Amino acid sequence: MGKLKIKLLPNGMIEMQTEGIKGKKCVNYAKVLQLLTDAKIEKVYKTKEYDESEYLELDESQRLSDN
Amino acid sequence: MSIVLKAFPMAFLISPNAKQVSSINERPDLSIENKNLQLIKVATNIQLEQVNYLMENLGIPYKYKNDTYILNNGINVHWELYNSRYCAFLSLNNHIPLTSRHAPASYLTKQSEILMRTFEVMLKKNIRDLKSKEIFYYCYKTEYKNKYDILEMLKEHKIENITKSTDMEIRFRYNNKNYKFIRKNKRDPFLIENEQKISLVNIGSGQKNITSRNINTNYTNKDALVKTLREHGATAIEADELNISCEMFGMQLIYSKNSSNEAYNLEINRITDENQCNKLLEDLKDEYGLNIQDLTYHTIMERLKDHNLHLEDERVDEDNSIILTINIG
């Protein structure tokens, strides 16, 4: 299960971080923030793992069991 | 595997982290050396008898017509009732000093400002119409005789905020300023009027230097702004869809905008202490931010249910940030 961590700063700004969401689909969750707040997205930072596929995120034991 | 994003609520026009545009306009922009500057229109708050008093006591100007005066310094003053206000139309005559003829626009601007200050000293009050935001309108000659040429030019410059378009008048907004192409006769070329916000100066008793100030704020949310002002002790708060006015620490604050999705322009009058004014602006900025944080929190809480999302955790950080953890998927 993924998580959104939303930080509401005292100056009114909003920061959000996705956790546990694999691959490029995590970008879609920016839309969730917009649904919840009507906020305008100023910047999106992608982490280095952003381009990793869901397959590469699976650990060795999971792949073995899938096979 | 994640993204981090920064966002800001619609209650701000631009990010609150962005640098705010703020300026103290003590005089009009003297950099204008445009030879096409034809006249300056100043909206005032005075009545006919005060107009007569001013002109009779101005050092015997030559009265050209009932409402037009020729001053020795090269300035013509024409008074006209315009939208229920007496406006001074200031232009140049042949008495302009030789030394200033290379920069007539600058001379007209400077002398107009001096003249308005003189009027204010004579009447011991600010004579510029506050409802018109103490605006100087600069009027320039243009070559345009056909409104379609103007509309084409505006289109080329990607100016789409055109609020009026007739054979005699075209109004538009550009870079947060109002502009107007106008003419009185269909055979004449258009003049272009460009508002120049100035602030200054009610010399009043002469004991304190009382100034005004214009600021482009970042605030768009009326309710949050009124709440902020009220919490900060503002009195005489009046608000309608586009305007909010109030009194605070002896100053008059007037927030105004032209449409609901714009940010408010703030005009502060009767400033006697610049430091106090700066402190007030900082405090209002902080409190508006806190009110928006609160507003955003409650909006999220309401909408979580609508979107079938579950709040796993919430806490408040040492810096007063609110951290919400939401389960998804």
Image (spheres, grey):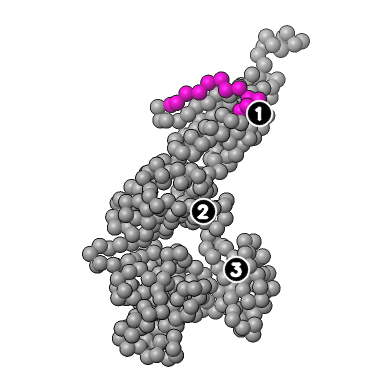
Q: Quadrant of residue B250?
A: bottom left
- Specify the amino acid type for callout 3: Arg
* Depicted B187 relative to depicted A31: above or below: below
- Rounded to the nearest angstrom, the CA distance separating label 1 from label 3 is 44 Å
Q: Position of residue A24 (x, y in %)?
A: 67, 30
Residue B123 percent coordinates (x, y): 31, 74
User: Which of disc 3 and disc 2 is earlier in sequence?
Assistant: 3
Please indicate whether residue B209 sits to the left or right of residue B189 in the image.
left
Q: Chain of mark 3?
A: B
Q: Which residue is mark 2?
A: B240
Label whose residue precedes the other's in the sequence (1 or 3): 3
Looking at the rendered image, the disc whose residue lies closer to the viewer, 2 or 3, is 2
Three-letter residue code for mark 1: His
Magenta-colored stretch includes residue B329: no
Mark 2, Cα crowd under 10 Å, few <14 / some 14-19 / many 20+, is: few
Q: Position of residue B209 (x, y in %)?
A: 27, 63
Instruction: Let me know if residue A64 appears in the view.
Output: yes
Tell me: B64 left or right of B299: left
At x 51% / y 79%, what residue is drawn? B36
State the extent of the magenta-drawn residues as a range.
B304-317
Q: Are marks 1 and 2 in contact (CB under 8 Å)?
A: no
The residue that label 1 is drawn on is B307
**How many discs mark residues in the rendered view?**
3
Q: Which residue is nearer to you in this view: B235 or B301?
A: B235
